[in-house]
Image: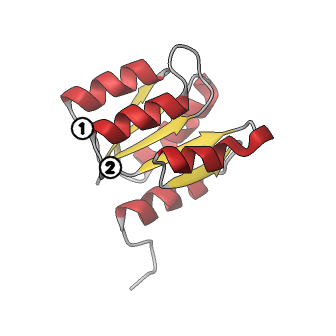
Amino acid sequence: MARIIVIDDQPGILRVACLALEAAGHQVVAYPDGRGGIAHIKRDPPDLLVTDLFMPEMEGLETIRLARDLQSRMPIIAMSGVYFGDYLEIAAKFGALATLKKPFRPADLVALVARLLGERQDGES
C-alpha cells in the first residue's frame, strides 16, 4: 500500500486518521505540525500527504505550498474544521487535490485516499 504523512495538531484527529489509514494497509507517519512533515518529505517523500489547515508553527497553506514545491505530483488532502472564508477552497488553489471537512468519518478519509491513489475499493471490478 501507500506511504502517507498525516499532519494535524489535534491529537484525537491525528490518531483517528492514522488508525483508519493503517487499518486500510497503509504505512503512516504522523506529525503535529507542518515543519516535521516538510522535513520528512525532504528526506523520504511519501505517496500522499494529509494536512490540517490551522496549526501553530507552520499552518496548512504554507505546508501545502512547500510540499507541492518539493513533490509536484504528490496527492495532497487538506482538512479543516474551520469553515469561515472557505479555506478548503483556498487550499485547492495552493495545490491540494482534495479536501475533507472535520469531523470526518474514518471510512470517508480511507475512500478519499484510495481515490487519489487510484486504488480499487472492495467490491469494485
For residue 76, the mark is none
Give the alpha-carbon distance from disc 2 to disc 1, as whole Å: 9 Å
**Which residue position is annotated with label 2?**
74
Residue 24 visible in the displayed image: yes
Q: Residue at x 79, y 39 (%)?
A: 84
Residue 106 visible in the displayed image: no
Q: Residue furthest top?
A: 57
Q: Is residue 85 left or right of residue 34?
A: right
Q: Earlier in the sequence, mark 2 or mark 1?
A: 1
Q: Counting other residues with Cα less than 10 Å from the Cα at mark 1, is it few (<14), some (14-19), or many (20 or more)?
A: some
Q: Do the CB atoms of the residues marked 2 and 1 lie less than 8 Å apart?
A: yes
Return the residue nearer the eye: 33 or 106.
33
Q: Residue at x 51, y 61 (%)?
A: 111
Vertical side of 92 occupied by 69: above or below: above
Residue 38 at x, y = what percent? 35, 26
Q: Residue furthest bottom?
A: 125
Q: Residue furthest left?
A: 43
Return the residue nearer the eye: 95 or 48.
95
Quadrant where the C terminus is found in the figure? bottom left
Return the residue nearer the eye: 90 or 24.
90
Q: Residue furthest right?
A: 84
State the scheme by which the image is colored: secondary structure
Q: Residue at x 36, y 36 (%)?
A: 67
Quarter of image, res 5: top left
Residue type for callout 1: Pro
Residue 8 at x, y = what percent? 54, 28
Circle 2 — which element?
Answer: loop
Residue 68 at x, y = what percent? 36, 41
Residue type for callout 2: Met
Q: Counting other residues with Cα less than 10 Å from the Cα at mark 2, is it few (<14), some (14-19), or many (20 or more)?
A: some
Circle 1 — which element?
Answer: loop
**Which residue position is annotated with label 1?**
45
